[in-house]
Image (tube, rainbow, N blue to C red):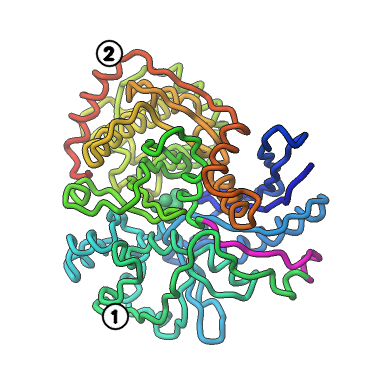
Amino acid sequence: SKSSAVLAFDMGASSGRALLGEITSSDHDSPGMLKITEIHRFANIPVQMGEHLHWNFPMLLQEVKHGIRKAFQAGHQPVSYAIDSWGVDYGLIDCNGELIGVPYHYRDLRTEGMVKETCEQVGKERLFQESGLQFMPFNTIFQLNAMLKSQSPMLDIADKLLLTPDLLNYYLTGVQACEFTMATTTQLYHVTDGEWNEKLLEELGLSRALFIDPIQPGTVIGKLQDSVAQELGVPAIEAIAVASHDTESAVVAVPANSVQFAYLVCGTWSLLGTELPEPLVHMEVLEEDFSNEGGAYETFQLLKNIMGLWILQECKRQWEIQGLTYSYAELVELAQEAEPFRSFIHPDDLRFMNPADMTVEIREYCKETSQPVPQSTGEFVQCILQSLALRYREVLERMEILTGCHYDGLHMVGGGIQNELLCRYTANAMGRTVWAGPVEASAIGNMLVQFVANGTLCNREEGVELVKRSFPLAWYEPASAEDWNAAFSHYKSITAQQQVK
Ligand code: LFR
């Protein structure tokens, strides 16, 4: 027998996908399994327009529409859809309901210097205590302050600010909503008061009216508006607000066996964290520059943004420009042939956030820190993957100090775990087990929240059990402890030269 199907859109910074989720069971006694079917996949390539980097928003909307149409064309009958995406980005809507300008990409350089300037203006400690967030230069607050500082007229005519998933849903349903987990990525949400930070908005000169009161994951936003349903030739299915921040959707799908678990959501970014019932906003957390992001089901996620596989993606793109095309499998193979522990980078040095040429940036870094400069492709990949694994260990150990918990191992989820060498290195670097899976964690977490919302699942816990039954985990046991411990000391002595926490 088949239960209702749902459609999940997971919008990543380099690609987006639509997956259909159905819970199937062969008979009444055996518990159901979650079956996921890929409906649609598309590249998400940002566009440099003049001085600024933007998302190709109309294209993204078109791809989502296309995904909905394709699901029905393939004979599926999803009862609802939901969208999750990267955090912080937004579109501004005018009083006629139209989009003002082209949404900016969070890597656009207009936020340069804005963390410092904003902190001077409103106070750094206070900003942390109220928002609970790590100071990432692209947080919505800094993007908006950059617009204010450049006297962008767009804010003058803006009626509402809609974060990416809400912006897409608006064009599909006609409803303007604000989903809670995304709201907490703005740094304008007061995480302990549980509402928009009115005082802060006022001090910055942002209108409170721009911000819609958040709704919780699991809330029905509305239905596909008639014009859209007609355009696509599909029924007017429901739109659900899930944990629409992709990281939070991924956490819902972590197949953990206890309440206290450590995870690494591994995609373009690496988010290393743990789930807590309350935000942790004391000074050591500020010191260590961790985030408390709002999660689904009244959780908070204490986590740290680590630059992640972006560094490798950018090298790969650079090599392609130079006419050298490699698959990720080939890159990993080349890495394994290269000498290990030769040179390290600090992945979170801001120079790696959006350099013109990542390979040049890595070379420069190694030169400046008096290390051997990577020459071959394999040496670059080796340097990136080993540095990431060591960084994960460092962040995990700091997190243990902050929470006072010990974590036996690390759950790795997301597309990045397809890089088995990274998983293995991570286990080795930490000296702990890595449980890898599922790959499509964000889409699966998205589906689970839809299934709980429509009553197919009783609660999140049932969803987690479903994930455990349906997706086998890959185990990585640590090895070569001595080499990796020595490498960790070496990594720390190199990276201590930067001021990055
Ligand atoms: C991961 C992610 C991170 C966020 C970054 C930028 O995809 O959502 O959580 O900090 O993208 O929005």
- Quarter of the picture containing the C terminus is top left
Mark seen at residue 408? none
On the question of residue 375 being in view, the answer is no
Residue 233 belongs to the span the image colors magenta: yes
Q: For mark 2, what is the residue? A: 482
Q: For mark 1, what is the residue? A: 205
Residue neighbourhood size for the residue with mark 2, other residues' Cα within 10 Å, grouped as few (<14), some (14–19), many (≥20): few
- Quarter of the picture containing the N terminus is top right
First in sequence: mark 2 vs mark 1: 1
Q: What element carries label 2?
A: helix
Q: Residue drawn 71% across and 64% down?
A: 237
Amino acid under disc 1: Gly
Residue 36 image position (x, y, % from top left): 68, 41
**Residue 258 appears in which quarter of the rendering?**
top left
Q: Residue drawn 50% across and 32% down?
A: 417
Viewer-closest of 256 and 204: 256
Which residues, given as a range, are shown in magenta? 230-242
Residue neighbourhood size for the residue with mark 1, other residues' Cα within 10 Å, grouped as few (<14), some (14–19), many (≥20): few
Amino acid under disc 2: Glu
Q: Position of 476 compared to 218: left or right? A: left
On the question of residue 224 being in view, the answer is yes
Q: Residue drawn 42% across and 61% down?
A: 88
Q: Is mark 1 on a helix, strand or loop?
A: loop
